[in-house]
Image: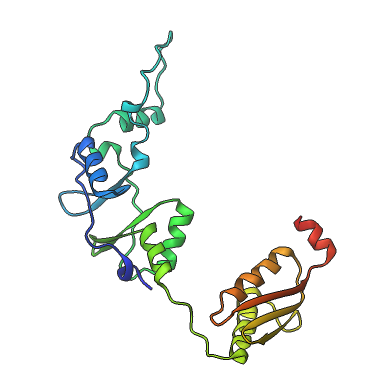
Amino acid sequence: MQAKDIMTTEVVSISPASNVRRAMGLMLAKDISGMPVVDDTGRVCGMLTEGDLMARREIRSAPCSQAESKIPTEADLERYIQSNGWSVGDVMSPNVIAADPQSEVADLAETMRTRKIKRIPILQNGRLVGIVSRRDVLRAMSEATQEAVARGDDAVRLAIITRLHADLGLGRENIEVSVGNAQVLVEGEVETELQRKAVKVLVEGVCGVAGYVDKLRVPSRAAGQDA
């Protein structure tokens, strides 16, 4: 699945020269928490988010007067501009993480997670063509169908054995899987309680499984370490 399959194409954007109050009103009216900032040439030059507006002077008490004047640092000046500036260009985050329409959704989700961002603008030939938000990714996940597995206990057993090896590195020398009337019984030994839980999650995620019986053993030393 690629960005083009899930992106929102009717993107709300704003100019860097726009007033911050107008930007706030637009975000409230459209029920969005952030939007791309697009300059006169159509280039995405920043992102404006709710987080960028949290330091605004309107919600802060007046600063206390100080007996001695303090020479502001570069960081102080940047905070001052962001909290007092009245153009979107003063307040926005200029470092934009963007992607193209062919980007894999899994890669976008990982970028959002690791970079702690909520949306990624999608650019084609440098132009804004869409945006992918966390909500878009969640919607795609909720609508995704489970991977098809051939019907029957034997097919379910084979699917589980295959995935145990591919996903968790567990072979038949570690674990024995049996299936009857779509009820899965797993026996054997794993190294840790966390590994045992991962096996349960894997089995329950296989299409066609109606129940799970866990008879896995964890060495007492490993169980104590996990606790």
Relative image position of residue 91 (x, y in whole percent):
29, 37
- Quadrant location, the N terminus: bottom left
In this picture, residue 164 sits left or right of residue 150: right
In this picture, residue 207 sits left or right of residue 60: right
Quarter where residue 4 is shown: bottom left
Relative image position of residue 77 (x, y in whole percent):
35, 28
Relative image position of residue 117 (x, y in whole percent):
41, 51
- Point 65% across, 83% down: residue: 161
- Point 36% across, 71% down: residue: 2
Quarter where residue 76 is shown: top left
Most distant residue in the right direction: 220
Most distant residue in the left direction: 40
- Quadrant location, the C terminus: bottom right
In this picture, residue 217 sits left or right of residue 210: right
Report the front residue among 21 and 39. 21
- 155 is higher (above) or lower (below) than 45: below
Report the front residue among 134 and 98. 134
Quarter where residue 218 is shown: bottom right
Report the front residue among 195 and 116. 195
